[in-house]
């Protein structure tokens, strides 16, 4: 049986401190949230992997599925409206930008009123 390799606590602390110092010195605007260096690094990496989506883009989940229209983008989460026939919204889902693939860039904007009727501009 293979013996587990254990990294000493001091070495781990040193590496985390080095990561935190790197982020603060080299990443503009960081730290922007109250979280540790590792969670900050994960958030930065995920943001870099996410496709650039804008309101009005038609997107699809990378795992497949229906096409959706981006209605709003908040803190790395994308509010997508699943469209049905006759321009009626079926439902809305908040999904991480990282799981989306952009199908089509649109120049139109979607407005959604309280009755879930969509209007194209």
Image (cartoon, grey):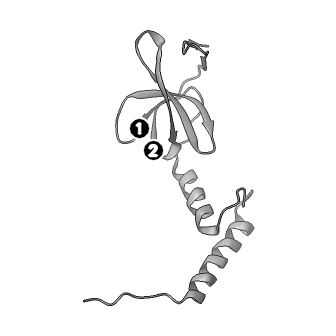
Q: Name the image quarter holding residue 85.
A: top left
Image quadrant where residue 33 sits: bottom right
The residue lying at 54 percent from left, 54 percent from top is 46
Q: Position of residue 83 (x, y in %)?
A: 45, 20
**Tag shown at residue 105:** none
Seen from the viewer's position, the closer of residues 114 and 105 is 114
Considering only vertical position in the picture, is 115 above or below 65? above
Q: Quadrant of the C terminus?
A: top right
Q: Residue at x 24, y 89 (%)?
A: 1
Viewer-closest of 90 and 32: 90
**Relative to 90, 23 lies left or right:** right
* 29 vs 26: above or below: above
Q: Residues within 10 Å of mark 1 (few under 14, many from 20)?
A: some
Do residues under tags 1 and 2 come within 8 Å of each other at their CB atoms? Answer: yes
Residue receiving disc 1 = 61
Q: Tell which circle, 1 or 2, labels the residue nearer the N-terminal end.
A: 1
Relative to 49, is 109 on the left or the right? Answer: right
Where does label 2 land, which residue? Answer: 99
Residue 2 image position (x, y, % from top left): 28, 89
Instruction: Write the residue at 34% across / 37% down.
Output: 64
Q: Secondary structure at mark 1?
A: strand
Q: CA distance from mark 1 to mark 2?
A: 6 Å
- Callout 2 crowding tier (Cα within 10 Å): few <14, some 14–19, many ≥20: some
């Amino acid at each position: 049986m293979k013996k587990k390799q254990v990294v000493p606590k001091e070495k781990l602390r040193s590496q985390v401190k080095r990561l935190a110092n790197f982020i603060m010195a080299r990443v503009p605007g960081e730290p922007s949230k109250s979280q540790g260096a590792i969670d900050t690094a994960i958030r930065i990496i995920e943001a870099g992997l996410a496709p650039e989506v804008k309101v009005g883009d038609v997107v699809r989940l990378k795992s497949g599925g229906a096409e959706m229209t981006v209605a709003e983008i908040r803190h790395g989460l994308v509010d997508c409206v699943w469209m049905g026939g006759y321009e009626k919204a079926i439902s809305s889902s908040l999904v991480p930008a990282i799981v989306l693939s952009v199908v089509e860039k649109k120049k139109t904007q979607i407005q959604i009123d309280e009755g879930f009727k969509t209007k194209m501009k």
